[in-house]
Image: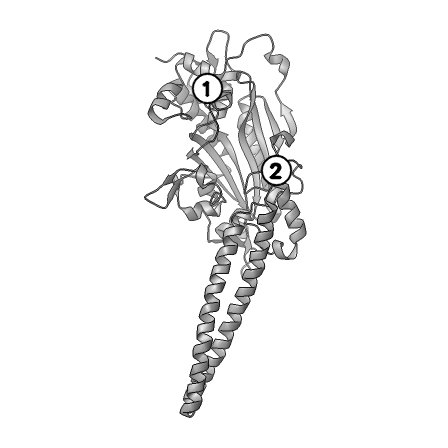
């Protein structure tokens, strides 16, 4: 949630920044109107309570002084009137606060001024490219991973669809081992610098609200209708929420957490090349990284997080590029994002495998996650960052497509061979 003071004290610049993120201007204006109204109703409530407290003290003093009955009756009558007015004011303030809270929950985080201008992925800026040369792919046919996986007997989309419907996958033999080798790689590379967590895979509505996934993305997630529980769409959700409602010490920052989780999303999109095979799944495996820090630590943590997310891609020898997302393509809760995309020659597509993002105090404000610089200081909001250390589905796909051999097998990247125990993926029946 953005700082509501920005909608009062810096409304013009704040409105302009939200418009860069394609927010409905009527929603922005409505948020300010409701915020001003709630401030007025809260002030009226506080004034009514002050008047009631004053008269209540007068009543108590009058009783102790043995005030005549007619005077006492007048004082008690005045107290009843003020009590009723205070109750009305309290209800009005409660309703006004609920109304403004509802609208503020719909406002996304403000884009960083350094994020490029633009409204869609076509306006994103490629910062750098590594290992990609179009000439390397000329002169031969490159099979997509869904064809390779079926030929090798390691990917069975048909049976997964029979069991669960479209946009699910089933990996077999070397396909399953390759996925878990990627998970092992992501965890091993970061184990010395992160606290490894095994979090719950189902969380409450409040937890999802704290990370900005509710209320906006309710239709994109899977809910257990008999309970107030949702399947996590990303490991970011439980990791960012570890210190919800807590106050940490500056000396304990930054906090760096890592988790391997299975994630669930109602991925939108019709059947086609962009959703075939492992490219878009309702259920997928991922190693996630989260940093919680003081505001002055953010840039350094972002640089480190980006380096940590790039390391496995570099070790796997996959061609990749770094993309600076424009304001209109940023996620709801982020203020700045660099995407890491790998090239898959069989699909002839750049596949996003990690979004390394700065979320500022947006999620910590919702979660009430704070820190103190020293004992006695007023608590300040933490700042959050996150990114995928290894999102397996598309990396799995890119390995098959980049390492396919003329004999129909797929070479195992050297860094994974110790996890796989072999250097080729072969047929499994």
Q: Which residue lies furthest to the front in this view?
A: 26
* Residue contact between numbered discs 1 and 2, judged by CB atoms under 8 Å: no
Give how far across and how far down residue 229 sits, in percent: 37, 43
Residue at 53%, 65% (x, y): give it: 41
| Earlier sequence position, callout 1 versus callout 2 | 2
Q: Residues within 10 Å of mark 2 (few under 14, many from 20)?
A: many
Closest to the observer, 396 or 67? 67
Which quadrant would the C terminus be assigned to in this image?
top left
Instruction: Please determine whether, in this image, residue 261 is positioned above or below residue 141.
Output: below
Give how far across and how far down residue 352 sits, in percent: 54, 28
Instruction: Please determine whether, in this image, residue 339 is positioned above or below residue 155.
Output: below
Give how far across and how far down residue 79 sits, in percent: 45, 79
Give how far across and how far down residue 351 sits, in percent: 54, 25
Q: Which residue lies furthest to the left in this view?
A: 226
Callout 1: SS: helix
Q: Residues within 10 Å of mark 1 (few under 14, many from 20)?
A: some
Callout 2: SS: helix
Residue 405's tag is none
Residue at 46%, 81% (x, y): give it: 78
Instruction: Please determine whether, in this image, residue 288 is positioned above or below residue 34.
Output: above
Instruction: Please determine whether, in this image, residue 137 is positioned above or below residue 183.
Output: above
Is residue 7 visible in the rendered image? The answer is yes
Closest to the observer, 389 or 82? 82
Q: Residue 345 appears in which quarter of the rendering?
A: top right
Closest to the observer, 240 or 102? 102
Q: Which residue is labeled 2 in the image?
A: 328
Q: Which residue is labeled 1 in the image?
A: 417
Is residue 377 visible in the rendered image? The answer is no
Disc nearest the viewer among 1 and 2: 2
> What scheme was used to colour the molecule?
one colour
Residue at 65%, 53% (x, y): give it: 11
Total tally of numbered discs in the picture: 2
């Amino acid at each position: 949630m953005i700082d509501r003071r920005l909608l009062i004290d810096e409304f013009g610049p704040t409105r302009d920044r939200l418009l860069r993120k394609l927010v409905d201007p009527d929603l922005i204006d409505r948020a300010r109107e409701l915020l001003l109204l709630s401030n007025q109703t809260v002030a009226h409530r506080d004034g009514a309570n002050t008047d009631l407290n004053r008269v209540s003290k007068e009543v108590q003093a009058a009783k102790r002084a043995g005030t005549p009955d007619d005077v006492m009756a007048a004082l008690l009558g005045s107290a009843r009137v003020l009590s009723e007015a205070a109750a009305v004011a309290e209800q009005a303030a409660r309703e006004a606060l609920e109304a403004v809270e509802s609208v503020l929950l719909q406002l996304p985080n403000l884009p960083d001024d350094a994020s490029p201008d633009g409204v869609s992925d076509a306006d994103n800026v490629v910062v750098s490219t590594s290992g990609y040369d179009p000439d390397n792919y000329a002169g031969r046919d490159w099979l997509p991973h869904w064809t390779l996986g079926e030929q090798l007997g390691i990917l069975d989309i048909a049976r997964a669809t029979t069991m669960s419907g479209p946009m699910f996958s089933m990996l077999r033999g070397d396909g399953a081992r390759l996925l878990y080798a990627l998970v092992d790689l992501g965890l091993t590379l970061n184990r010395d610098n992160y606290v490894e967590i095994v979090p719950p895979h189902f969380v409450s509505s409040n937890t999802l609200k704290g990370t900005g996934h509710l209320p906006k993305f309710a239709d994109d997630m899977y809910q257990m209708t008999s309970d107030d529980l949702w399947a996590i769409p990303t490991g970011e959700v439980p990791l960012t929420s570890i210190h919800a409602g807590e106050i940490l010490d500056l000396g304990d920052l930054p906090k760096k957490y890592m988790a391997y989780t299975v994630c669930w999303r109602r991925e939108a999109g019709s059947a086609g090349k962009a959703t075939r095979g492992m490219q878009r799944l309702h259920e997928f495996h991922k190693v996630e990284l989260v940093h919680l820090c003081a505001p002055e630590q953010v840039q350094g943590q972002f640089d480190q997080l980006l380096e940590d997310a790039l390391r496995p891609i570099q070790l796997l020898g996959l061609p990749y590029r770094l993309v600076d997302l424009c304001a209109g393509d940023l996620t709801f809760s982020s203020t700045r994002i660099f995407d890491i995309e790998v090239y898959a020659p069989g699909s002839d597509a750049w596949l996003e495998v990690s979004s390394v993002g700065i979320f500022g105090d947006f999620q910590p404000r919702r979660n009430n996650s704070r820190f103190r610089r020293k004992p006695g200081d007023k608590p300040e909001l933490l700042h959050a960052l996150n990114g995928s250390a290894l999102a397996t589905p598309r990396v799995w796909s890119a390995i098959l497509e980049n390492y396919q051999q003329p004999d129909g097998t797929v070479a195992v990247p050297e860094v994974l061979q110790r996890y796989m125990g072999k250097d080729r993926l072969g047929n499994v029946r």
